[in-house]
Amino acid sequence: DTAVSQTPKYLVTQMGNDKSIKCEQNLGHDTMYWYKQDSKKFLKIMFSYNNKELIINETVPNRFSPKSPDKAHLNLHINSLELGDSAVYFCASSQEGLAGGTTQYFGPGTRLTVL
Amino acid sequence: SQELEQSPQSLIVQEGKNLTINCTSSKTLYGLYWYKQKYGEGLIFLMMLQKGGEEKSHEKITAKLDEKKQQSSLHITASQPSHAGIYLCGAGVNGGSYIPTFGRGTSLIVHP
């Protein structure tokens, strides 16, 4: 069984549209994350949730809104998509916050292309 | 915020050769992670180092955190094509909260 899964794997859409990416983890972890990896492979944290509570929000435009219905799910909704949003988005989870020295488990990524 | 510089940016080696990837921080590292990303896939955890001078090995990959805890090196012995991918170091301390930060990655190609 996949530990951290994301859907869809690929997403191609027009500028101005609203889209969502879903993430689910079956590891029983308390903390989940969203990362953005740009075309130069630079991986940058966007959000982190611990037990459905937002704990990291790293200068991400308001168009991006994470939603955690329960601690096993962290979805990412993006409004009014822009060309610069094209990237690979990774979801990850960890047993506890990273400061405790725990390991992150990553999903396979969602490649978003905005035309 | 934490800055992590990786070198080299890319590496092409012949199968069987040894290689080293470095990760240097602008600040003291509290927990340094190494990940591997296969092309087009997610990140796979390799190792975590926390104590200065700590060294860990997994199969033919060894990682070390220097005593001053501002640099880590990843060494691959007798490289194989299966080692190909992007290696990323990750860490993060930003004031009182932990903000995970990654280096820009080192792309490794191993020619058979």
Image (cartoon, rainbow, N blue to C red):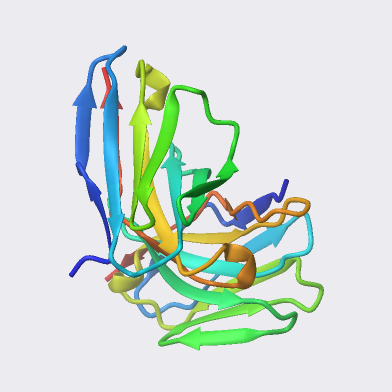
Q: Nearer the viewer, residue B93 or B35?
A: B93
Q: In which quarter of the image is residue A7?
A: top left
Report the residue at 54% width, 49% height from top: B104
Q: Quadrant of residue B107?
A: bottom left
x and y percentages locating residue B78 in the rendered image = 41, 83
Q: In this view, does B30 lie above or below A51?
A: below
Left of A8 or right of it: where is B111? right
Report the residue at 65% width, 53% height from top: B5
Q: In which quarter of the image is the C terminus of chain B?
A: bottom left
Report the residue at 43% width, 37% height from top: A38
Q: What is the total number of numbered labels drawn onto the structure image?
A: 0
Taking the view exactly as shown, the residue that stands out farthest to the top is A16
Q: Is residue B43 visible?
A: yes
Left of A28 or right of it: where is B63? right
Report the residue at 55% width, 61% height from top: B89
x and y percentages locating residue A70 in the rendered image = 35, 52
